[in-house]
Amino acid sequence: MDNETINYTYYHWGPLLYKTKVNHERRNKILKICEKATQSSVPDLAGHLEKELELPALKIFNILSPYFRSYVRCGEETNFNCTNLPLLTMKSSWVNYMVDGEFNPPHNHGGVLSFVLYLKVPDKLKKENEKFKGKSIGPGGIDFRIALGRQEGMLSRDSNKFFPEEGDLFIFPSHLEHWVCPFKSKVTRISVSGNLEKMLNQNVKK
């Protein structure tokens, strides 16, 4: 009896949160675009940041498009509902220059999919996060969370937390709530975000 083999299946619940690494060449292309940005996006965003600048969405989309296609393949392989996801275009994109004391409160995005790409994560910020002692992800970390109501904490996982590295790209449904913790180091962390939506006037077979 004690040697009985027990077969089981467990199920992944919640939004499809995808993480990958963007190669150096593509990151450099995006950095050069960021350096030319001048138009503020602050009034349209949730972040408590002083410097958030609008980027040309289609240029960013073209650079990152292989990763969005990979997200769709991941969804298909893991039995998520990815109907019509290939027929997307980028609605908006912006660069965040985050400095000490700034943060992003809990929020979600518009559109169908959203992403965040980390271009610069200074060493001082990494060391600050390593020294942090507490239950949260700590300074400069990002927390993705779903609401579980009364069952929260009971045999359930309601969040995924990360301290990002340079090149990390997260793609996720736009409704997925997330936030970024503030930090104290006198540095600037650079990240790029954006929203994707379904293309207009598309002819889709039913």
Image (spheres, helix red, strand yellow):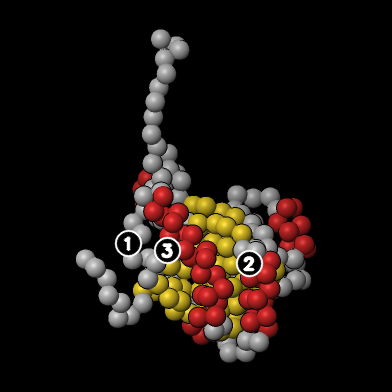
Disc 3 and disc 2: Cα gap in Å? 18 Å
| x 64%, y 50%: residue | 134
Look at the numbered discs 1 and 3 and tell me whether their residues touch, using CB distance below 8 Å.
no
Res 170 quadrant in image: bottom right
Disc 1 and disc 2: Cα gap in Å? 28 Å
| x 44%, y 79%: residue | 91
Tell me residue 150's x, y (percent). 36, 48
Of the pair 151 and 52, the residue shown nearer to us: 52
Of the pair 165 and 45, the residue shown nearer to us: 165
| x 43%, y 67%: residue | 113
| Residue type indicated by callout 1 | Thr
Which of the two labelled residues, at mark 1 and mark 3, occupies the earlier sequence position?
1
Mark 1 residue element: loop
Q: Is residue 147 above or below residue 8?
A: below
Of the pair 39 and 74, the residue shown nearer to us: 74
Report the residue marked by disc 3: 173
| Residue type indicated by callout 2 | Tyr
Report the residue marked by disc 2: 118
The label on residue 83 is: 1
| Residue type indicated by callout 3 | Pro
| x 60%, y 55%: residue | 162
